[in-house]
Amino acid sequence: MTLFALDEDRIAIRDMARDFAAEKLAPHAVKWDHDKHFPVDVMREAAALGMGGVYVREDVGGSGLTRLDATLIFEALATGCPTVSAFISIHNMAAWMIDAYGSDEQRRRWLPKLTTMDAVASYCLTEPGAGSDAAALKTRARRDGDVYVLDGAKQFISGAGASDLYVVMVRTGEAGPGGISTIVVEKDAPGLSFGAEEMKMGWNAQPTRQVIFDGCRVPVANRLGPEGIGFKIAMAGLDGGRLNIAACSLGGAQAALDKSLVYMADRKAFGKRLSDFQALQFKLADMATELEVARTFLWRAAAALDAKTPDATRLCAMAKRFGTDVGFQVADEALQLHGGYGYLADYGVEKIVRDLRVHRILEGTNEIMRVIISRGLVGRGQGGGS
């Protein structure tokens, strides 16, 4: 990639994902939302095209692509359905954590099935009493010979009850981030259960439930890396997850903008097409500009994460904050441009608005993104830098 343009390979990756979204996701998105249907079979079709392990290494079936490639894929998928795209992103995040921090045996045990999505994975960090303050998590893993015994609960877990693997952050040591470890819990583990399915504003095409551990016995061999690095693993996963959820916001917003262009070219008021009114043309211009700015910066942050630059975490937080705010605002403006029709489910715009609203909360709230960004700024000032 040059600084401002995609090369032919990346254009092909984006177009492949966009074509899949148009054919396999968009025609069904409103019905899936209404029926609360979790389309695992369709996600497996996406995985067959390499989207089940986008940045997992190739020796275990992954595509071995970059974080920048992933942002192109998830934005493109989200033009068809942000909910499905976001879940595939979460699955990819969990698979990458196993690929990056697991042993060779663990990688070969779990990843071939994850990359095909014959097995589906969930990421389990948030708890009923530990959301933004993730380091305060209380789910405990007590060592008992060659197993851990887990007790506690995880909250707002996408795919809970349907997933095959749960990448879980647990407390194995003292309070604070240094006492956290990461354990992979399989769906048939004794003592694992799930809460009732949550009734949500959006994201209805994926289940959200509590994951409950009541004396849940898991082999010590399922721990990723040594004890005490679980918080590091969780945060590393979230850097990429934040890029992906920003990409999902931009894809959903782009779809809403595209719907607006078609609607305004057809709809007439006061004897003219809506698209002939300069005030509305200016609105469209602002929406398109905001999306382009957010997209360009998202690529910048993704390139930084690929290069492992010192400011990558800060840039990922910036991209997540800006991209999810812009995405929601553009989708909301698109609904307004549709007038009363935008409020109807048939047009698909109100679903996009509902789906994108949660992107400003998950993968770290946008307020926490500001904490991450400002922490470095304040530290620089206190250090006496000019």
Image: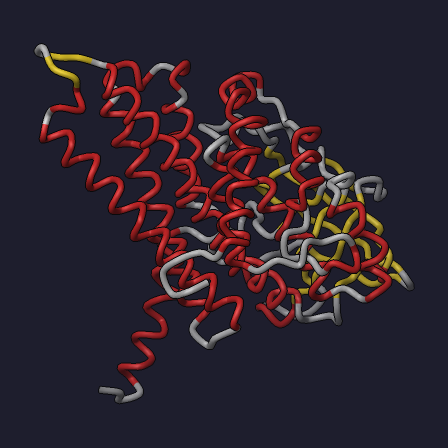
Q: Residue at x 71, y 33 (%)?
A: 162
Q: Residue at x 67, y 37 (%)?
A: 160
Q: Is residue 114 above or below residue 279?
A: below
Question: Residue 355, located in which quarter of the rendered image?
Answer: top left
Q: Residue 380: where, in percent of width, then height? A: 31, 81
Q: Residue 105: where, in percent of width, then height? A: 86, 62
Q: Is residue 39 above or below residue 11?
A: above
How many numbered dots are placed on residues in this image?
Answer: 0
Farthest residue to the top: give it: 271
Farthest residue to the bottom: give it: 384
Q: Residue at x 29, y 32 (%)?
A: 332
Q: Residue at x 24, y 20 (%)?
A: 265
Q: Is residue 155 above or below residue 260?
A: below
Q: Is residue 378 above or below residue 239?
A: below
How is the structure coloured here? Answer: secondary structure
Return the residue nearer the eye: 57 or 92.
57
Judge from the rendering whether residue 213 lies leftward or rightward of residue 219; answer left or right: left
Question: Residue 85, located in which quarter of the rendered image?
Answer: top right
Judge from the rendering whether residue 5 lies leftward or rightward of residue 87; answer left or right: left
Q: Residue 172: where, in percent of width, then height? A: 72, 65
Q: Residue 317: where, in percent of width, then height? A: 41, 60
Judge from the rendering whether residue 267 lies leftward or rightward of residue 180; answer left or right: left
Farthest residue to the right: give it: 145
Question: Residue 64, located in which quarter of the rendered image?
Answer: bottom right
Q: Quadrant of the C terminus?
A: bottom left
Return the residue nearer the eye: 254 or 179.
254
Judge from the rendering whether residue 346 lies leftward or rightward of residue 280; answer left or right: right
Return the residue nearer the eye: 384 or 265.
265
